[in-house]
Image (cartoon, helix red, strand yellow):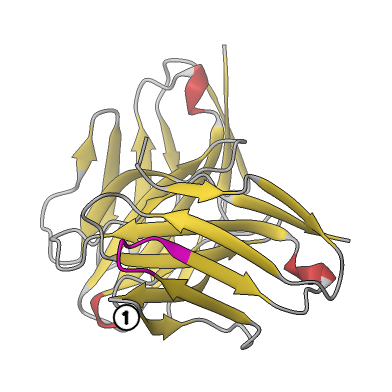
Amino acid sequence: AQKITQTQPGMFVQEKEAVTLDCTYDTSDQSYGLFWYKQPSSGEMIFLIYQGSYDEQNATEGRYSLNFQKARKSANLVISASQLGDSAMYFCAISRGSTLGRLYFGRGTQLTVWP
Amino acid sequence: ETGVTQSPTHLIKTRGQQVTLRCSSQSGHNTVSWYQQALGQGPQFIFQYYREEENGRGNFPPRFSGLQFPNYSSELNVNALELDDSALYLCASRAILTSTDTQYFGPGTRLTVL
């Protein structure tokens, strides 16, 4: 079974500072994908970043980067230069190629950015 | 904007009723998945449709059913509604056989069962 653990129910960061949101996963599969999504209070899940299990370099998308430590089964999201609009719920998710894209989500981390 | 739309935005039903939720996938995407997100939880996979057939299902009873149409739009049907069915229902579409397997979500339908 796939399992995603997000141990930080809430995080607070000051505007313009960097923040790291933790995610660990448990899978016996060799091929898998890791995702981070942002969910504002409106409810829509917004795709942020993807990391494949065979990717040797950490993924980056603008202010978002994924700190992928495969041996530790860790896929932390780093947001640089936080903005007030980054305040939202953040979900880590994993997919297996054999299940055609089914996503398994963690319970999320509520990020609050203050001025 | 993901190009994935859902209707209605909000819905209130009573226990025992039936409900149909609709999703229109992003252009070029041939696979649609449905997720249920209870308050304070991460989304839970309900099922996935590819080429108009269900090809994966999560731990949900048969009263949750779906359809995918040739134009890649989709429906989620829930019969005999229960109070615990109150949740945000999200659909997500993707183009199968892409390198990243990324799913793009719609804005969701918030269902309240009284």
Q: Is residue A46 magenta?
A: no
Q: Which residue is painted at 45% across and 46% down in the image?
A: B5
Q: Which residue is painted at 46% across and 74% down in the image?
A: B67
Nearest the eye: A107 or B35:
B35
Location of residue A31 (image quadrant): bottom left
Q: Which residue is painted at 77% across and 79% down in the image?
A: B80
**Hey, which residue is sitting farthest bottom in the picture?**
B62
Nearest the eye: A56 or B26:
B26
Measuring from the top left, give residue B48's x and y in whole percent: 40, 74
Measuring from the top left, give residue B61's x and y in whole percent: 64, 87
Q: In the picture provided, is B13 more to the left or to the right than A92?
A: right
Residue that mark 1 sits on: A99
* Number of numbered callouts drawn: 1
Image quarter where the C terminus of chain A lies is top right
**Hey, which residue is sitting farthest front in the picture?**
B70
Type of amino acid at the residue the image marks with label 1 = Thr
Location of residue A114 (image quadrant): top right
**SS category of the residue bearing label 1:** helix
Q: Visible in this render: residue A23?
A: no
In the depicted structure, whether residue A62 falls above or below residue B53: above
Give the residues in magenta. Answer: B69-74
Q: In the picture provided, is B20 more to the left or to the right than A61?
A: right
Nearest the eye: A96 or A74:
A96
Q: In the picture provided, is B90 more to the left or to the right than A10?
A: left
Nearest the eye: A13 or B40:
B40
